[in-house]
């Protein structure tokens, strides 16, 4: 059987040279952003990381091979091919064995990054506990994956379509650390403040790097650290809440559940907000890439 993992030229060189690396998920490219802006945003995110001295490692599966870092043609394939599914960590072996292609979720990306020894990961918003999970048991695999991995994840909190309070409770139960970057309020993706407080605040990448190093000293690095980085300009909250309510009602009407809820609601936000949510989503990932690169460099 051929090797299941392939490193890009740049990532291979970075590993050999000890250059800081930042992992990036690919679901946002294939399923989170519309064409053709998805490819442009992916390219810009990688450029932001390079400009700050680190190397981007966008992770995806193509034709049965896990790619840690994508060459230009491979990034284009993830953005534009129609056979790209969405893979969590449980799907990886199946997709590899069947020779298929998939973009990786937060859970799958963090898992693969950990295999490669990459410790810093930038994404948009985490998955979490879905609304109504007390009946549906719908909870993202992101949470259980991050409870088992040494990974620092830079994000804009959890997606505001989720049950934020229940997600925070689960993060505490799973011993996943949370710090707010220049804030004591837990962000809600499109919103700078989800309505919940964060106990620990940090104001620089160097402070975050010190926490990461201390985690190793006290043996708490077997669980992830979440760095929440609120978007600079949020969506109007009343408008956000109205769009969310109609989106949830439409999803229930259309029988949308499980892993299909998130892309359905994100598309609803994009349409109902006339592109505002897409612009915010783009700013979220770019800002998180910049902070993740600064953290990776501070760990040198």
Image (spheres, rainbow, N blue to C red):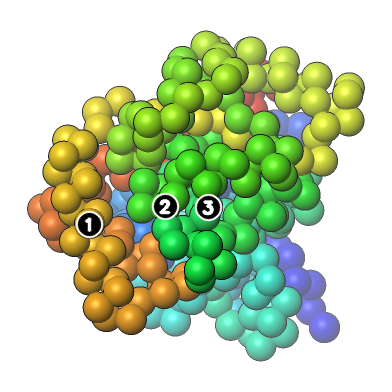
Q: Residues within 10 Å of mark 1 (few under 14, many from 20)?
A: few
Q: Which numbered disc, 2 or 3, marks the residue that appears first in the sequence?
A: 3
The mark lying in front, picked from 1 and 3, is 1
Instruction: Residue 117: name its quadrant.
Output: top right
* Foreground of the two, 160 or 4: 160
Cα distance, mark 2 to mark 3? 7 Å
Image coordinates for residue 78, horizontal then vertical, percent: 45, 67
With 88 as the anchor, is 114 left or right in this view? Answer: right
Tell me where residue 243 appears, x and y as whole percent: 18, 53
Q: Position of residue 218 (x, y in %)?
A: 88, 24
Residue denoted by label 1? 245
Q: Residue at x 45, y 44 (%)?
A: 164
Label 2 Cα crowd, 10 Å radius (few <14 / some 14-19 / many 20+): many
Mark linked to residue 132: none
Above or below, comparing residue 78 to residue 297 in the picture? below
Residue matched to label 2: 162
- Name the one closer to the observer, 184 or 6: 184
> In the image, what residue occupies the spot 24% across and 28% down?
233
Residue at the spot 48% in from the left edge and 24% down from the top edge = 197
**Mark toward the start of the polypeptide (1 vs 3):** 3
Q: CA distance from mark 1 to mark 3?
A: 18 Å
Residue occupied by mark 3: 128
**Marks 2 and 1: in contact by CB < 8 Å?**
no
Q: Secondary structure at mark 3?
A: loop
Residue 211 quadrant: top right
């Amino acid at each position: 059987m051929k090797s299941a993992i392939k490193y890009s030229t740049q990532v291979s060189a970075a590993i050999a040279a000890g250059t800081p690396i930042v992992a990036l998920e690919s679901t946002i490219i294939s399923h989170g952003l519309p064409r053709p802006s998805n490819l442009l945003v992916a390219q810009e995110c990688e450029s932001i990381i390079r400009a700050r001295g680190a190397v981007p490692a966008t992770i995806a599966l193509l034709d049965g091979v896990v790619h840690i870092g994508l060459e230009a043609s491979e990034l284009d394939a993830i953005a534009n091919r129609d056979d790209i599914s969405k893979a969590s960590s449980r799907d990886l072996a199946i997709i590899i064995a069947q020779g298929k292609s998939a973009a990786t979720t937060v859970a799958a990306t963090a898992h693969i990054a950990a295999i490669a020894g990459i410790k810093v990961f930038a994404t948009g918003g985490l998955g979490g506990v879905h609304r109504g999970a007390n009946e549906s048991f719908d909870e993202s695999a992101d949470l259980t994956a991050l409870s088992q991995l040494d990974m620092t994840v830079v994000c804009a909190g959890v997606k505001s379509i989720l049950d934020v309070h229940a997600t925070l409770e689960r993060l505490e139960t799973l011993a996943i650390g949370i710090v707010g970057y220049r804030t004591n309020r837990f962000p809600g993706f499109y919103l700078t403040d989800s309505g919940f407080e964060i106990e620990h605040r940090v104001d620089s990448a160097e402070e975050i790097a010190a926490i990461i190093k201390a985690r190793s000293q006290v043996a708490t690095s077997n669980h992830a650290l979440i760095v929440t980085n609120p978007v600079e300009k949020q969506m109007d909250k009343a408008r956000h809440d109205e769009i969310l309510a109609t989106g949830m009602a439409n999803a229930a009407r259309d029988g949308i559940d499980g892993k299909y809820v998130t892309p359905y609601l994100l598309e609803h936000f994009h349409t109902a907000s006339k592109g505002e949510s897409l612009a915010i989503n783009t700013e979220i990932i770019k800002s998180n890439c910049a902070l993740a690169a600064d953290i990776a460099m501070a760990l040198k």
